[in-house]
Image: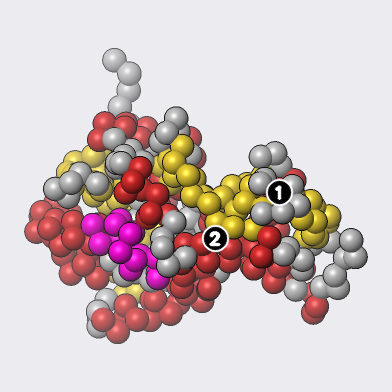
Amino acid sequence: MLKPEIEDGQASLADPAFRADVLNGLAARPRAIPARWFYDRRGSELFEHITDLPEYYPTRTEAALLDQAAGALAEAVGPGRAVIEFGSGSSMKTPRLLRAVAPAAYVPIDISGEFLRSSAADLSRQFAGLAVHPVEADFMHPVPLPRAVADLPKLGFFPGSTIGNMTPASATDLLRTMRQSLGQGSMLLIGIDRVKDEAVLIPAYADSAGVTAAFNLNLLERINRELGGTIPIDAFEHQAVWNDDASRIEMHLRATRDVAFTVDGRDFSIAASETIHTENSHKYGERGARVLLRAGGWTPVAEWTDPQGWFALILTEAKPVETAP
């Protein structure tokens, strides 16, 4: 296959971590690319559309829980904290939390810089007088916080059950990283999706309007654009499956025919029916969620769930590490 010319050095300007993850993921067996690379500008916009879909229950369920818990949160958290949101996206749920806890500052952290700055500006207009300090970073690694919030007590905010996108081992590592970033004595408010019937789960990740399919396929568009790829988008389809053994929804890009293409000058071929694994969404039972949080260094202190038990909002604290008896 002829290798395409990469215009204006576009591949050389791509995020080196993105390049490495894509090239390594396409070469691996089974093939897999980390879900965090969904979120370029277009991917972030598509995800916000997903959250409004009738099949996608997590967003509206969690938003209702934030409203329900507002009074108890205010009492437990107290005013004057710096709210640190990991993976802030559009910060759609954030106003509910900010109104409840009366923070001294807000620090949204997101990997999509353009989307981050736009959302931070919108929030600044909503909350006049609130210090907003956007940080463009990959929160999977320790994030140095702005000096302006260094001496403030901190409340981490990690909504949307994003923790479910990681394997349990990676989720534990992330929780420990968050504890390191926020410090002992800080608090973390986290959304965790519960195990439920497959008939509810599958439509949430394979909606009838095809928005989630577009979101998944946009990853290939991004690879072609930023890494000089020649992937034929029409040769792939979105696939969502429930893996009961791992207690997770998996999203894949399935090849509908044999394909050959290049990415960053490297040749790849994928056989018909072979997939690229692009996302996991782990679901946790009540006890499993608490064990996960404790393993990551966070002690649950309060919990709210909806009447159906589909979703949990858990407030935790970074207490001193327990020693074995």
Q: Residues within 10 Å of mark 1 (few under 14, many from 20)?
A: some
- Which residue position is annotated with label 1? 272
Q: Quadrant of residue 89?
A: bottom left
Element type at mark 1: loop
Badge 2 amino acid: Asn
- In the figure, 196 relative to 155: above or below? above
In this view of the protein, can residue 99 be seen by the observer? yes
**Relative side of 260 to 177, left or right:** right
Q: x, y (%) of residue 169?
A: 48, 35
Give the quadrant of the N terminus.
Answer: bottom right
Residue 7 appears in which quarter of the rendering?
bottom right
Q: Which residue is mark 2?
A: 216
Residue 127 is labelled as none
| Image: magenta residue range | 47-61
Q: Is residue 140 above or below residue 131?
A: above
Q: Residue at x 30, y 41 (%)?
A: 197
| Residue under the point 71% across and 48% down | 272
Query: Residue at 47% across / 65% down in the picture?
Result: 210
